Amino acid sequence: MKHFSLNTLLCIIVVASISIAPCESDDKLITQTCSKTPNPPLCVSYIKADYKSKDVKDVPGLGIIVAQIFQLKAKVPKDILFLMLSVGKNPDIQVQMKACFGSYSFLIYTAMPATINAFQVGKPRLAEAYANTAAIGVSDCEKSFNGKSPIHADNIITHDIALILLD
């Protein structure tokens, strides 16, 4: 029984060594790239949380991952706004909610796909312009509620992700 345990342990060590080795170079790329953003720890945590990041070998690839993360995170406030609008909740802020819903829909379905495409075709400045549009759109959404939107926390998250794309 001890022989089996030793073999199992050796196998685990070998597999762990093999799987850790390729990540070192990816970690360096992620760390170097994220160090140029306004919030490096946030950038690193979002990218590393995406399983596809281990296969990325260049900065545009990381940009694509962050744009996809923006799309995913932006769906939360869009869906919250949709539900609130559907049930007629907070009639006094319907106009702002509709505007924010429209903004998030544009960012998710138009601006971020364009950002991803710009990275894919080698136009990082165009990708940055779309990311700037996203940051402004989210910021304008929050401002329309005088900083007290029903999606305040989600606006902060999506704004921070858009800022990561700017650098």
Image (cartoon, rainbow, N blue to C red):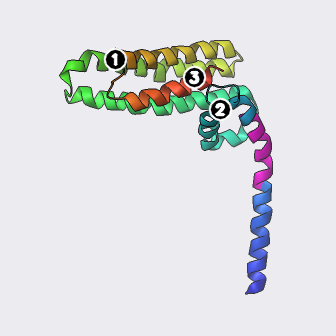
Looking at the rendered structure, which numbered label has been put on residue 163? 3
| Magenta stretch in the rendered image | 19-30
SS state under label 1: loop
Locate residue 164, reporting x and y percent: 60, 26
The three-letter code of the residue at mark 1 reads Asn
The three-letter code of the residue at mark 3 reads Leu
**Residue bearing the label numbered 1:** 146
Q: Earlier in the sequence, mark 1 or mark 2?
A: 2
- Is residue 26 shown in magenta? yes
Q: Residue 9's image quarter? A: bottom right
Judge left or right: residue 154 versus residue 18: left
Outermost residue on the bottom side: it is 1
SS state under label 3: helix
Nearer to the camera, 99 or 43? 43
**Residue bearing the label numbered 2:** 40
Instruction: Give the Cα separation between the discs numbered 3 and 2.
Output: 11 Å
